[in-house]
Amino acid sequence: MSNSTNNISQDAVSRRSFLTASAGTGGAAAFTIVRPEVLRGQVKTKLKAGLIGVGGRGRQAVNDLLTGSENVEVVAMADVFEDQLEKNLAWLKNDQRNARIAERVKVGPEHRFVGFDAYKKLVASDLDIVMLCTPPGYRPEHFEAAIEAGKHVFCEKPFGTDPVGVRRFMEAAKKSEEKKLTVVSGAQRRFNREYVETIEKIKKGVIGEVVAAYAYWVGTPVIQQRSRNPQWGDMTWQHRAWYSHVWICGDQIVEQHLHNIDVINWVMGTHPISVVATGGVAWRPKDEIHGNIYDHVSSDFVYANGMRMSSYCRQYPGALYRNVSELVVGQRGRSNCHDLGSKGERDYVAEHTALVNSIRGDGPYINHAMAVAESTMTCIMARESAYSGMEVTWDMIMNSKLDLQPKKSGYDEKFEVTPVPVPGVYKFT
């Protein structure tokens, strides 16, 4: 499973990765096991990372990790689709722009794992870091497996697509804290110096008490597949067109708008206690290419102290108005959450530099698992309010039995797409 797709038939690719994966995690290329509790400032060693989800986001995360530190190698990869793994591995190995990165991608055939259980084989390998870059529907079970195996984690956002899954993630987050494992999220604004310094000043009262907040992601659609290969079963199709399906994507407010909502939660130091949201489908055709997600959602969040956040996201095609930003209003001023800080390195690289420094003890210990899990649940809370037309509280979402994940996995498994939610008809549970 990967964060980009193409039209190569699964049957058209070589079976080499399947055969090598069946050999297990042994083989001639042994990895050095470095205990997490030893790494914190006591051992200076080259860390070994493995990637789960070898799509466009995954390969870029590898690029950013290796750019951010000379002390890391990538030695294992896992994906549902072999063509995705091989294509993006080749892209990294043949990257002529930066040979220093390509030479540290050392993924031999015996450490290329393919299939729905490929992640289990990767986390069982002798790795220090596991990078989770699949579509977010799989994040809870992959994160849980990585933490149980004692790995440090880079975890792309969001951290799930339904309440049951995010609560599962939260339980693993508690274990990661107990084990003192480093967990860095793909909510990269948390590593942008301008944001970090500005929000620190806001928390110290530079603009006074925050009395209102606004969050926006007004952009364009994400559509990965324009047609369905007739050889693809339901599960293959929905994985390759994952952004169009709520069970694996979470809808725009969860998958994308989380960035902005997470910033406001970060400013507030907590999550909202309730939300009333509205949304729908203004332009997306009701066909299998466009799936069952909304193209706009507007939300009114309330925090425990009475402060309100107005949030709006949409994905409309064409050269229309765009706005990706945050704004907080204080009693003595306002801030866009990055205007009071100094410029630093590119935040996508900075998050990986911080990851390695936390593991090695060269920087502060970082574990953002619970904070970004709460932001993920905040977004799901708003989505469910928009879908149902109800006010949804934090207690309601934390006790929800909603579980969107399929009970069986397989390339040809039948998995019908649920209808686009209609408020008043759709039932929040």
Image: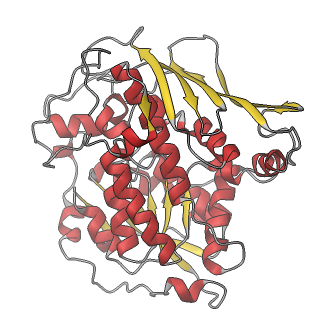
Q: Residue at x 44, y 87 (%)?
A: 33
228 sits to left or right of 259: left
Location of residue 340 (image quadrant)? top right
Quadrant assignment for the C terminus: top left
In the displayed structure, 99 sits above or below 391; it is below
Q: Residue at x 45, y 43 (%)?
A: 377
In the displayed structure, 81 sits above or below 73; it is above
Q: Residue at x 40, y 25 (%)?
A: 385
Q: Tell me where residue 122 appears, x and y as whole percent.
A: 33, 69
Location of residue 72 (image quadrant)? bottom right
189 sits to left or right of 151: right
Instruction: Report if residue 5 is visible in the image.
Output: no
How was the colour assigned to the protein in this rendering?
Answer: secondary structure
Q: Tell me where residue 69 appears, x and y as whole percent.
A: 66, 69
Q: Tell me where residue 162 appears, x and y as whole percent.
A: 33, 42
Instruction: Report if residue 293 is visible in the image.
Output: yes
- Residue 256 vs residue 233, the one in the foreground: 256
Q: Tell me where residue 66 appears, x and y as whole percent.
A: 60, 64
Residue furthest front as drawn: 305
- Residue 184 vs residue 369, the one in the foreground: 369
- Residue 29 vs residue 281, the one in the foreground: 281
Q: How many marks?
A: 0
